[in-house]
Amino acid sequence: MSGTTTAAAALRRRAAGAGANRWVVLVVLCVSLLLVAVDATVLHVAVPAVTEDLRPGAIELLWIVDIYPLVCASLLILFGTLGDRVGRRRVLLLGYGLFGLASGLAALAHDPQVLILARALLGVGGAMIMPATLSILRQVFPDRRERALAIGIWSAVAAVGAAVGPLLGGFLLEHFWWGSVFLVNIPLMLVSLPVGRLLLPESKGDGRGPWDVVGALMAAAGLFGVVLGVKRLGGGEPVVSALTLAPLLTGAVLLVLFGRRQRRRTYPLVDLRMFARPAFSTSVGCIVLAMLALVGLELIAAQYLQLVLGLSPLETGLRLLPLTFAAMAAGLAGARMLRRFGPRAMVCFGFCLTAAAVVLLTFMGRTDNSALMVAGFLLLGFGLETTLFGAYESMLSEAPQEQSGGAAAIGETSYQLGAGIGIALLGSVMNAAYAPGLTRVDGVPASASSSASHSLGEAYEVAAQLGGHAGLALRHAARDSFVHGLHVTLLVSAGLLLLGAAMALRLPRVMQCEAPPVELPKPREAVEPRVSA
């Protein structure tokens, strides 16, 4: 009997790829994630150089910046579930290849249309890579204790990538042309492809039933519409605008139809019964709320540092580094905290700590208080990463192993949606609190005040054009209004974070560490994918 048990355990390790190389596999997966995370933010500092060289119109520039996250978020479910069917490593390696080719095309783009196309292809490659890294990680680490540590390292790398992007972009732009921000991907992909083929284990779902092509396309189109509408709201578009309402409503209808289709199918693309599990649905909601707070606050904090305190882009990036270091520390300590306190206490603590950090940051004013800022960003980074770690680990552990690709795609989609909603919601709160302070400024014409109420950057431009006492008065009024709006936005964020802490009370109290059941390999015919419309 013991011999049978030993053989079964050995079979499970080989099937899952959880042998001695599993930590090497984790390194390969983290490099993959690092590239995608860096590419999401590296272009931000290159926008002025791209504008000067390619001369894109306002709409073209918007698409250059937004098309990557838009396409990536839309296709996560499609490629996550496809990986469950045809093989997660196969999809990941194809994503590597496409990401490298698209990077070369973007670096050599000679007009805005080519750059938009290249960024869209980068989004496709990113959507192939991101859910595959998490689902392979779920397969390689069947033991939940080890998997928690692996997810901590994985999430710490994601935090590093998001912060390194602007710094790397700024360094490259000081020494090379703007296309160099894309060229750095190519050598890393050339290394990752053969290494990934040699070291990464192949894994699939149970292969039952055909892959729902129509459902996959409905999910992609629905998410595209919703994310596009949310991004337009975040860009300041009015809610009643046809260009905002049309994609939002169309996307919402398609997602509702997608959900109904999945419930009727014997073999659904995404098993929506996962959302009936409190731990899974709660984890997804916590990811959305955490990202909503993080991205919206980072955007407003960057504006505060540059426009109110007058720091350069590089100095701004350095000021935000404490947030990144704290997030890395939380990711690395996450596995130990999860074992000691359990998912419920860990995620609640993360939300409450983040809310406390946000309240602390409301003491920021018109003058630089670096000590307060460092303390606030440290607490903010540690709290948010603690929340995201606990939520991701609970979500991934609650999903059936054969649905790990779909579950990872849902988690990453929640991440992207939370980021988009955060920019839209907190940006709207900020504008609503900022604009009233500029309705009447002594010596400033009403038309100038109206233009200045759009943003602090535009207010400074109007003030420079006015000059004299009126320009100085407008500049001071705009700065004071922005600081007031920042305080209101931070308090709203604190309220949302406390709502997340209350939501996290539905998570399990303790971490379950039972090993998954042993699954014998299925005949080849049983796992070959079939495609149907």
Image (cartoon, rainbow, N blue to C red):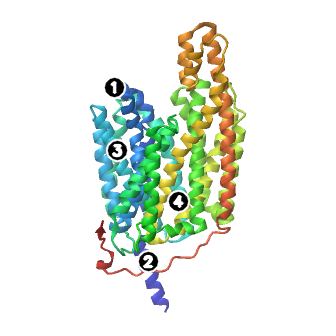
Tell me the CA gap for discs 3 and 4.
28 Å
> Circle 2 sits in a helix, a strand or a loop, which is it?
helix
Q: Position of residue 391 (x, y in %)?
A: 58, 59
Q: Which residue is mark 3?
A: 120
Q: Amino acid at mark 3?
A: Ala
Does residue 237 show up?
Answer: yes
Q: Is residue 254 left or right of residue 459?
A: left
Q: Is residue 91 left or right of residue 286?
A: left
Q: Quadrant of the C terminus?
A: bottom left
* Disc with the residue nearer the chain's start (1 vs 3): 1
* Disc with the residue nearer the chain's start (3 vs 4): 3
Q: Residue at x 54, y 66 (%)?
A: 275
> Circle 3 sits in a helix, a strand or a loop, which is it?
helix
Q: Which mark is residue 12?
A: 2
Q: Which mark is residue 151?
A: 4
Q: Are marks 1 and 3 in contact (CB under 8 Å)?
A: no
Tell me the CA gap for discs 2 and 1.
56 Å
